[in-house]
């Protein structure tokens, strides 16, 4: 514990007496400084006990001296009597009392050097105690990191050492571990701070207050493998920050190991998927990956469009429900083999194009993958999830790439650009299978008027509208353009 002004007053060998500011005697002393300057403030950093005999002090200067010391955060003022002044000036006592600045009377027999030595010894002892505490804490953290529960054990140990709550978050700001468990409920309050930290990218740290709690947050590693958040009701001292930094270093190493192991497992999953597609039996070794195939028949699910496939796969594996599902990377997609009980979870991933096959077995897995990939291509055009079985009812347009269909339609109907009346007339005529009277009634015009319009369309397009193929092309083009 740091030395306080009250500790100095309690030291009978020094014989100090508090003359003002007794309510603030519990202030810690960072150092002792002696000065006879009228304005010593420029030479102080804050937290010092200033010692003076008041050699240059006059009654009118007392208020100014107290104000200057208070402005720089001095811990207190020690006034030596028996030299320049027989007693502490009354004006100085009054000014210090008003400002709440501790004022200690130093008797003539007590040399200033004795006070400096007492503070120096206390500061050295406190630093040594802090160093020992930090060393012990680092040793305990290292032991926790070496256990089978590694990361989780380290988080719990840090919380106990600092009497604090601790959260470990993944790179996306999602909760990995918390100590105590209930501390995880604070994540919502931290959301904005986590997003600011994520935006900084790389090494970053921040300290802030949140709901009466002092919080320290830092990114783990230069590539931000996660975030460590520590909070408690009281402030963190220097030794506390050393302990937090040690924990952050150990967690970074631990997460690197977890990440390397996860990457190896993902490569194995992808390799085993390729073997299954070739018809090789691999079920007996999947248990070593903590993975299993769902009961047959299952469905193949292809998820495309993730910015980071590794992150998506790691999240899916971590969030996987109790129902078994085999997950692996393949090309630019994540492939899942899942039964109907896990299908809603897998197809409900936001922001992805998802394709689902018909039920299949490992014997026809390659065909299931083909179906899911084809459905995923259709899903890219706007639907979150598409089942292969639904493709048959989706029409010819879903089989044509959107860009190609748009270009085709604009080229076919280019001579009718800005001819809205002709386009509507053509649409109505084709919709009624070339029958003049129903189409004219739909448009509210005479059939001879419609006949003239259609003949004009044929002339502009240079096409024979009596040909079924021509009519089919024009109808497809009108559908694409929404005409």
Image (cartoon, helix red, strand yellow):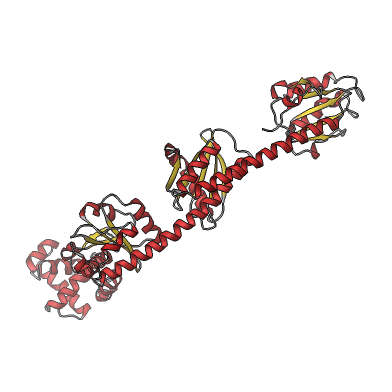
The spot of residue 157 in percent (x, y) is 51, 41
Horizontal and vertical percent for residue 397? 21, 68
- Looking at the figure, which quarter contains the N terminus? top right
In the displayed structure, would residue 144 be above or below residue 255?
A: above
**Left or right position of 243 against 63:** left
Q: In the image, residue 5 lies at what x, y percent? A: 73, 27
Q: Is residue 191 above or below residue 6?
A: below
Farthest residue to the right: give it: 83
Question: Residue shown at 15%/80% (left/top)?
Answer: 464
Would you say residue 214 is visible in this rendering?
no
Q: Is residue 306 left or right of residue 211?
A: left
Classify residue 376 by image quadrant.
bottom left
Q: Nearer the viewer, residue 337 or 268?
A: 268
Eyeballing the image, is 79 above or below 290?
A: above
Residue positioned 57% across, 46% down in the render: 139
- Image quarter of residue 463: bottom left
Quadrant in the rendering for residue 303: bottom left
Quarter the C terminus occupies? bottom left
Query: Residue 478: x and y, percent?
Result: 21, 68
């Amino acid at each position: 514990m740091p030395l306080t002004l009250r500790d100095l007053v309690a030291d009978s060998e020094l014989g100090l007496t508090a003359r003002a500011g007794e309510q603030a005697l519990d202030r810690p002393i960072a150092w002792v400084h002696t000065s006879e300057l009228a304005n010593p403030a420029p030479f102080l950093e804050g937290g010092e006990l200033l010692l003076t005999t008041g050699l240059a002090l006059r009654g009118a200067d007392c208020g100014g001296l107290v104000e200057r010391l208070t402005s720089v955060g001095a811990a207190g003022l020690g006034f030596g009597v028996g030299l320049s002044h027989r007693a502490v000036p009354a004006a100085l006592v009054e000014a210090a009392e008003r400002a709440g600045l501790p004022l200690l009377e130093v008797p003539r027999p007590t040399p200033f050097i004795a006070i400096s030595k007492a503070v120096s010894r206390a500061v050295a002892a406190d630093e040594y105690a802090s160093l020992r505490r930090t060393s012990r804490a680092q040793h305990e953290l290292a032991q926790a990191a070496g256990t089978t529960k590694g990361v989780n054990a380290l988080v719990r140990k840090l919380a106990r050492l600092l009497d604090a709550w601790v959260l470990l978050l993944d790179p996306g700001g999602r909760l990995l571990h918390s100590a105590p468990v209930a501390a995880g409920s604070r994540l919502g309050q931290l959301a904005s701070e986590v997003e600011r930290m994520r935006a900084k990218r790389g090494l970053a740290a921040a300290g802030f207050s949140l709901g009466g709690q002092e919080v320290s947050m830092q990114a783990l590693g230069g590539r931000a493998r996660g975030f460590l958040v520590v909070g408690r009701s009281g402030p963190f001292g220097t030794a506390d920050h050393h302990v937090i930094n040690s924990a952050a270093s150990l967690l970074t190493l631990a997460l690197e190991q977890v990440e390397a192991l996860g990457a190896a497992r993902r490569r194995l999953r992808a390799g085993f998927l390729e073997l299954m597609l070739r018809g090789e039996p691999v079920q007996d070794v999947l248990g070593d990956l903590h993975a299993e195939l769902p009961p047959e028949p299952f469905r193949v699910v292809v998820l495309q469009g993730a910015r980071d496939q590794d992150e998506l796969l790691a999240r899916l594996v971590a969030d996987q429900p109790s129902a078994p599902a085999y997950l692996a990377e393949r090309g630019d997609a994540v492939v899942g083999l899942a039964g109907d009980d896990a299908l809603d979870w897998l197809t409900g991933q936001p922001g992805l194009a998802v394709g689902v096959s018909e039920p299949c077995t490992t014997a026809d897995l390659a065909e299931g993958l083909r179906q899911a990939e084809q459905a995923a291509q259709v899903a890219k055009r706007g639907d979150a999830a598409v089942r292969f079985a639904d493709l048959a009812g989706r029409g010819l347009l879903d089989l044509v790439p959107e860009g190609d269909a748009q270009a085709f339609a604009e080229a076919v109907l280019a001579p009718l650009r800005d001819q809205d009346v002709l386009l509507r007339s053509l649409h109505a005529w084709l919709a009624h299978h070339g029958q003049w009277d129903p189409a004219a009634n739909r448009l509210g015009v005479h059939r001879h008027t419609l006949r003239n319009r259609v003949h004009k369309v044929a002339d502009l397009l240079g096409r024979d509208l009596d040909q079924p193929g021509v009519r089919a092309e024009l109808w497809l083009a009108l559908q694409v353009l929404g005409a």
